Image (spheres, rainbow, N blue to C red):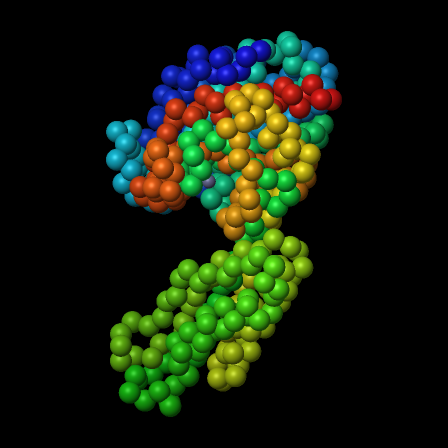
């Protein structure tokens, strides 16, 4: 098996599939056109296919010719509510929706891995589960697929899991990167409504003005982070929305804001959950107002198994050369629902440079309307997934 060569031979069809998907981006758990394109691309391969019940997930199992471990490979498929400005000639045909995080490459790359492995089915010592996942961007698609049994799709729990994410800036094109242990943060949401009593803007003393109180809370949340947590405990709170009022001379009844909260340790998460809620309620009460506050845990931290991350690094270097691997110096505060898979089974997530710029610092970041991904990296990404599956099965 020479997956690099075999992947290069199907690069054209993988790129064509990626561009077809790029034109028809879909958001959330319901991706009917994407699912149809994946099923068409898998047509004729010796796969056992199961479709999602609560989403348009596709789970495909390839049975190897010999017994052995079960390995899961994952590609997420959903897009974002972004209006595309990337300038590519296969730009989004769905107004206001864009594959701005490169999940079109993940989907096509996983199809590629399925084709490569299916061609060697009889030689495989184990089974491969291909996890085509919708709803990564905040919809917990991984949670939906796990609830419907993707980890047991081969008839037993998978032994290892790998996932790959393309990056449109920062990482040089064609370079793979990961790290042992924590790689991405846990994400949570803090949702606040400060409830006061509105009235005429000229007579604030007759009202309970929620705006200065909510503004004070926003500032105090940053103080909470710097005064209540060690500087060595990575934690971020960002207030991303703040809404109140209709006109400058009217004091509104309420002010609302939402924050994203990023953490790594369970201790920090439990503490920020408890103390942020208390802080919101306490500041509102200090001014004679009330607050409705909800803290929602979204995705857990993405934590790579140390041995599996080392295995990924060795496999990349072996397959493509030392220069194609760079160890991630530190985790990032982004989050990812592949974390749910890695909570359940050992494995590793990886980033993969797909910037169109020769200097990656000049690339527009993932989620930007100008984000662009070079699909010349697709074949190598598919080859790596196939290689990881084979080597992991051979390890027993
Ligand atoms: Zn993404």
Looking at the image, residue 335 sits to the left or right of residue 378; the answer is: right
Residue 231: x, y in percent? 59, 63
Residue 326: x, y in percent? 53, 35
Q: What residue do we see at 32% from left, 89% from top?
A: 203
In depth, the one of 49 and 15 nearer the eye is: 15
Q: What residue do we see at 68% from left, 21% from top?
A: 393
Q: Quadrant of residue 124?
A: top right
Above-or-below relation of 218 to 237: below
Numbered disc total: 0
Q: Quadrant of residue 155?
A: top right
Q: Quadrant of residue 28?
A: top left
Residue 321: x, y in percent? 53, 23
Q: What residue do we see at 52% from left, 71% from top?
A: 223
Residue 36 seen in the current view:
no
Above-or-below relation of 294 to 50: below
Looking at the image, residue 261 sits to the left or right of residue 182; the answer is: left
Residue 159 seen in the current view:
yes
Residue 370: x, y in percent? 31, 41
Q: Which quadrant of the rendered structure holds the N terminus?
A: top right
Q: Which quadrant of the rendered structure holds the C terminus?
A: top right
Q: What residue do we see at 54% from left, 64% from top?
A: 294
In depth, the one of 249 and 111 nearer the eye is: 111
């Amino acid at each position: 098996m020479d997956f690099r060569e075999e992947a290069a031979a199907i690069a054209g069809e993988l790129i064509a599939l990626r561009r077809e998907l790029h034109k028809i981006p879909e958001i959330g758990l319901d991706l009917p056109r994407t699912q149809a394109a994946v099923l068409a691309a898998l047509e004729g391969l010796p796969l056992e296919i199961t479709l999602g019940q609560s989403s348009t997930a596709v789970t495909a199992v390839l049975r190897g010719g010999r017994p052995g471990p079960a390995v899961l490979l994952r590609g997420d498929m959903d897009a974002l509510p972004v209006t595309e400005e990337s300038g590519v000639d296969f730009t989004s045909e769905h107004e206001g929706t864009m594959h701005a995080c490169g999940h079109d490459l993940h989907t096509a790359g996983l199809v590629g891995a399925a084709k490569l492995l299916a061609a060697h089915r009889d030689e495989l010592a184990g089974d491969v589960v291909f996890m085509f996942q919708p709803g990564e961007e905040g919809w917990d698609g991984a949670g939906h697929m796990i609830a419907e049994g993707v980890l047991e799709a081969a008839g037993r729990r998978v032994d290892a899991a790998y996932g790959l994410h393309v990056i449109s800036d920062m990482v040089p094109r064609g370079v793979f990167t990961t790290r042992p242990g924590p790689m991405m943060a846990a994400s949570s949401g803090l949702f606040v409504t400060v409830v006061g009593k509105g009235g005429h803007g000229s007579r604030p003393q007759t009202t309970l003005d929620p705006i200065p109180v909510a503004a004070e809370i926003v500032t105090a949340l940053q103080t909470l982070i710097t005064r209540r947590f060690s500087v060595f405990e990575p934690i971020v709170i960002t207030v991303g929305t703040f809404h109140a009022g209709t006109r400058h001379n009217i004091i509104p009844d309420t002010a609302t804001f939402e924050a994203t909260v990023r953490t790594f340790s369970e201790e920090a998460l439990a503490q920020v959950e408890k103390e942020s809620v208390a802080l919101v309620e306490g500041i509102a009460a200090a001014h004679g107002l009330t607050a409705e506050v909800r803290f929602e845990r979204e995705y857990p931290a993405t934590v790579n198994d140390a041995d599996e991350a080392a295995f990924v690094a060795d496999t990349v270097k072996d397959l493509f050369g030392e220069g194609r691997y760079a160890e991630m110096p530190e985790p990032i505060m982004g989050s990812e629902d592949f974390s749910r898979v890695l909570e359940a089974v050992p494995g590793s997530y990886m980033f993969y440079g797909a910037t169109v710029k020769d200097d990656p610092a000049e690339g527009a970041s993932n989620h930007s309307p100008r984000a662009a991904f070079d699909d010349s990296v697709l074949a190598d990404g598919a080859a790596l997934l196939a290689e990881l599956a084979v080597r992991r099965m051979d390890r027993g």
